[in-house]
Amino acid sequence: MRTAVHPSHSFLYGIHKPAYNVANQRGQKKIEELGRTVSGTPLTNQGNFPDGPLHVSGADWIFEIPNPLPFRGTTFIDKEWADASADHPQRIHLVEQEPLSLSTVLSKEQIPLTLLDKLPRPLLLALATGSTDPNDLIRLAELACCLQKDERGVPIGLIYNDDDRGRNRARISDHELFEAVANNPALPDTYKEIMVLRPGAQGGSEIVGEYAVEDETHVFEYLRRNSYIAGGHYAANMADDAIRYSIGSLSKNDMEGLRHLYYQRTFIRLADHLGLAYGTEQRTLSVDEMEGLRKKIIERISKDSSLDYTATLWGWNFGFDYAPTGYRLHASHQQIHQQYAMLPEEVDTYCGDPLKACGTMAAFGCGDMVAEVIQDYGEETGKDFFTDYLACIRNNVRMDGRSDLESNLIIWEDEHAMLFVPKAQTSQWELQLMALQDQNGAAVGNILEADTATRAALNYGIFLAQKSLAALGARMVTSIEYPKRLGNKGEKGQHLLYAFLPRLPQSPGAFSEAQLRFINGHYPEDFAAVCRQQLRQLSHIE
C-alpha cells in the first residue's frame, strides 16, 4: 500500500540520490556564438557539445513522498530548491499585482482614449483582467454590453432583447469580455451589481435561502436546477449588498453565513426525507434550531439505514482569470461563493439501452476513496488509519535532518479541528483541515456528526486557511470536502477532511500532475511556519 503513514507513527518516504552514466550518441557538433559578455568576450555553446560519454555524479536529491491518501498520488521535492526556501522562507510568496492603467498612459502620451475601443480582442481581454483603473474598466463594460442609464448618465441596469425562443436576454456583444470586466475587483460596484450581482442578472435561478446580519453580512442561496451534479446543487453567494471579491474583504461573519446555508440545506433535505418536522415557514433556522434538528436526524438514522442520499458534496472555487487567448483559468466568477449538493447511495446502470436498467452501481463521492484507504490500511497493518495519521502529523520530523528549523506541520488547532500542511502537498501550497473527535471520542466524519462547536471550528479553520493563503499572495484557490457517508453507510473511524489547493502561476498542471506526480520546491514544514507567521500578523482574526 503506497502511503507515507506507518504504524510506527512516523512518516515514511524515499530519497533518490542519483549518479549515472550517459552514452553519447551524437555525431556532429554545431558550435555557435550565443552573444557577448558585458566585457566583450564571445560566449559560445561549446558546453552543449561534449566529447565522449558523460558521468553524472552528485545530482540533486529528490524526496519521493507517497501521499497519506494513496489515490492522491505522490509528491516529489527537489532538495536544492527546498533547501533554498528553508534558508530564505520569504521566497514562499507571490508578488502583488502591479497597478495598471491604459487610460493614464494614453493621456500622458496625448493619445485619444478612443484608441482603447479599437484594440484587438486579445488586448481587450488582457486589459479587462489586468487593469486596476476603474476608467479602463468602465469603458470596456460599455464595449461589452448595452447599459441602461438614468438622466444623469449613471448605469441602472442592462438592456434586454427577446431571443428566438421568446426569452429575455441581456444585449451582450462580447460574453468573454463581459465576464472578464464584471469579475475585475477594480470595476466600480455599481457596474458589478447591474452586470452580475443583482438577483436575476445571471438568469432565473431561484433564491431559496438567505443568511443576513444587519451591516455585517448577507448571503443568498441559489438553486441550480439543471446542474452538472445530478439532482441539482445549491450555491451560497455573497449578496449584491455584500460584495466580496477578495479574501481580504471576507469576514468571519461572511464565512459563518456561507457555511450556515450549507448545513441548513443538508439538514432540511435529510429531515424531509425522514419525515421529521422542522418548521415550514420561510425563514433561516437559528444555530440552536439546526442543532436540535441535527440530533433528531442522528437519532432517526441510527435506527434506519434506508437513506437514498448518503453523502454531501461541498466545494469552493475562489478567484477568476482569463488568458488573453480566451482560456478561462479558474472559477466562473470572482464573487465569493460556495457550492454544495447531496449524492445518492447508488445509481441505476445501463448497457446500450438508455430506457432499460440492468442493475445498480455505487454512486461516486470523493469521500468514498478515503473509506477505501481506511479499509486497505486496516487489512494490511491491523491498525486504524486516522489514529496513525494523526500520530504521524504530531510526531513529524523534517526530511532534511535540520534541527535548527521548525518541524511542526500544524498551523492552527483547537479541540474540534486541526489546520495543517500535508506531508505530501498535491498543490505546492496545499493546506488541509481535519475534524477531530466528538464528546464521546468518536471521529467526526461528516457535517451531520459535527455538533455546533465542531461546525464553528470548521468554519473558522476554513477562514484561517483562506486568509493565510491570500496573505502569501494566492489569488486562485480550489477547496473541497472529503466526507464520510451518512449514517450506517459510513466507514468507522473516518475523519472529515478539507483540502485547499492554490493554483500558482508557475504550476499550470501538466503531464506530471496528470500522472499524479506533484512537484514541490519547499519542505512542508517551512510552508507551515510561513503560514503561522502570516496568521500572527493578521491580528484581527485572532
Image: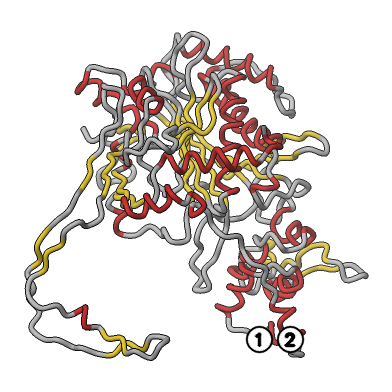
- Which of the colour schemes (rainbow, by chain, secondary structure, one colour) is used? secondary structure
Is residue 273 visible in this depiction of the protein? no
> Looking at the image, do the residues carrying marks 1 and 2 touch, with CB atoms under 8 Å apart?
yes
In the displayed structure image, the side of residue 32 where residue 226 appears, left or right: right
- The quadrant of the picture occupied by the N terminus is top left
Residue at 20% from the left image edge and 88% from the top image edge: 31
Is residue 288 visible in this depiction of the protein? yes
At label 1, which amino acid type do we have?
Lys
Q: Is residue 541 above or below residue 276?
A: below
CA gap between label 1 and label 2 equals 7 Å
Q: Of residues 472 and 311, which is closer to you in this image?
A: 472
In x, y percent, where is residue 503? 47, 54
| Helix, strand or loop at mark 1 | helix
The part of the image, by quadrant, that contains residue 482 is top left
In the displayed structure image, the side of residue 327 where residue 107 appears, left or right: right
At label 2, which amino acid type do we have?
Thr
In the displayed structure image, the side of residue 26 where residue 169 appears, left or right: right
In x, y percent, where is residue 49? 17, 80
Residue assigned mark 2: 114
| Helix, strand or loop at mark 2 | helix
Residue assigned mark 1: 118
Q: Of residues 159 and 388, which is closer to you in this image?
A: 388
Q: Is residue 57 above or below residue 357?
A: below
Q: Of residues 47 and 151, which is closer to you in this image?
A: 47
In x, y percent, where is residue 247? 64, 47
In x, y percent, where is residue 201? 70, 56
